[in-house]
């Protein structure tokens, strides 16, 4: 058996122990924003709606039921590779063993607060590896821009006032928020250990991107995306376990996702 296979088996065993033995690791934290009237969506997407079907007392018990509706790509959600790559996995076809992984956090929040158009670069990834070592399969790479703190402030979160966000131009929307640069995305996609990439902004690509090169680089390797991820400030650079559990939507290009992290 190769050393890579042995490492993978050992890692799988350790992840399983974390899940099955609650005393073997630290607390869980939720990196998911609640779906409600504050949920962020790109203009034109169906916003979250919860409508009451029944709420009241019946003979001997209480009954409460609702219908809900939402776009695939809003709130904390998973992008399936097919979203930007023809022939990529749809949501229900992503292997479930990719939903439980090592969490690796690259923090560019200081730079993001100073420059909303900044991007994750190969230099950021190289510096992370120099400090923490190679990524180990399976890893979900999280990019912490600090933008989860702006969730309730539409102007800060999107980089434009709400009225400007609605104005689509021939090259898309004039928005400004950090993302993953093309060269960094290509480096991640080529590594082989990364199964998913998440970010705490509206898109894997920066707001100024028009052709979504980061999406393309990752999705053609069937690496899924997580967008609108919540506050990562408590998640260490390495050592945590992440669960990204999307709705199992047949044929879906994406869908709501509960993102949980267990601290080491």
Image (spheres, helix red, strand yellow):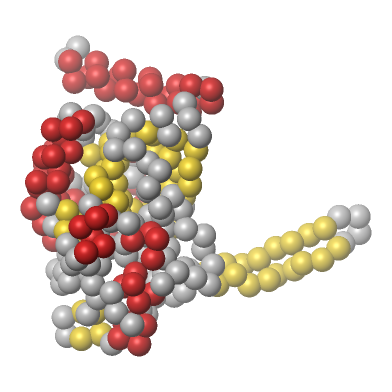
**In the displayed structure image, the side of residue 29 where residue 129 appears, left or right:** left
Which residue is rendered at x = 52% and y = 60% of the image? 34
x then y, percent, for residue 80 = 31, 54
Residue 199 visible in this rendered orientation of the protein = yes
Of 90 and 141, nearer the camera is 141
| Residue at figure coordinates x 33%, y 82% from the top left | 161
Q: Residue at x 37, y 33 (%)?
A: 240
User: Is 95 in front, or is 115?
Assistant: 115
> Which of the two residues, 242 or 149, is positioned nearer the viewer here?
149
In this picture, residue 56 sits left or right of residue 112:
right
In the rendered view, would you say 231 is above or below 173?
A: above
Residue 84 x %, y %:
22, 61
Furthest toward the top, the residue is 1
For the image, the number of numbered tags is 0
**172 over 199 or under it: above or below:** below
Q: Position of residue 89 (x, y in %)?
A: 28, 50
Q: Please tell me which residue is depicted at 41% across the width and 29% down the height of the picture.
A: 264
Instruction: Please state the horizontal and vertical placement of residue 156, each as a whole percent of the image.
Output: 34, 72
In the displayed orientation, state which residue is furthest to the right: 59
Indicate the quadrant containing the N terminus: top left, top right, bottom left or bottom right: top left
Q: Is residue 26 above or below residue 77?
A: above
Q: Is residue 176 left or right of residue 256?
A: left
Whether residue 252 appears in this view of the structure is: no
């Amino acid at each position: 058996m190769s050393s890579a296979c042995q490492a993978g088996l050992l890692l799988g065993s350790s992840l399983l122990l974390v899940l099955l033995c609650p005393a073997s690791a630290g607390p869980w934290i939720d990196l998911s924003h609640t779906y409600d009237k504050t949920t962020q969506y790109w203009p034109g997407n169906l916003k979250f709606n919860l409508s009451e079907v029944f709420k009241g007392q019946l003979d001997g018990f209480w009954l409460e039921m609702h219908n809900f509706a939402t776009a695939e790509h809003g709130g904390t959600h998973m992008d399936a590779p097919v979203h930007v790559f023809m022939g990529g996995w749809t949501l229900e076809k992503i292997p479930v063993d990719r939903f439980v992984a090592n969490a690796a956090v690259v923090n560019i929040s200081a730079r993001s607060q100073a420059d909303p158009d900044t991007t994750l670069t190969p230099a950021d990834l190289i510096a992370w590896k120099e400090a923490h070592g190679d990524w180990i399969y399976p890893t979900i790479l999280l990019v912490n821009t600090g933008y989860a703190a702006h969730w309730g402030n539409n102007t800060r979160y999107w980089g434009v006032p709400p009225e400007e966000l609605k104005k689509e131009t021939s090259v898309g929307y004039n928005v400004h928020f950090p993302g993953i640069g093309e060269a960094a995305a290509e480096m991640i996609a080529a590594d082989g250990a990364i199964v998913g990439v998440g970010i705490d902004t509206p898109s894997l690509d920066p707001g100024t991107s028009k052709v979504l090169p980061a999406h393309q680089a990752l999705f053609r390797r069937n690496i899924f995306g997580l967008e609108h991820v919540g506050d990562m400030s408590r998640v260490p650079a390495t050592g945590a376990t992440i669960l990204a559990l999307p709705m199992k939507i047949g044929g879906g290009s994406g869908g709501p996702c509960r993102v949980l992290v267990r601290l080491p």
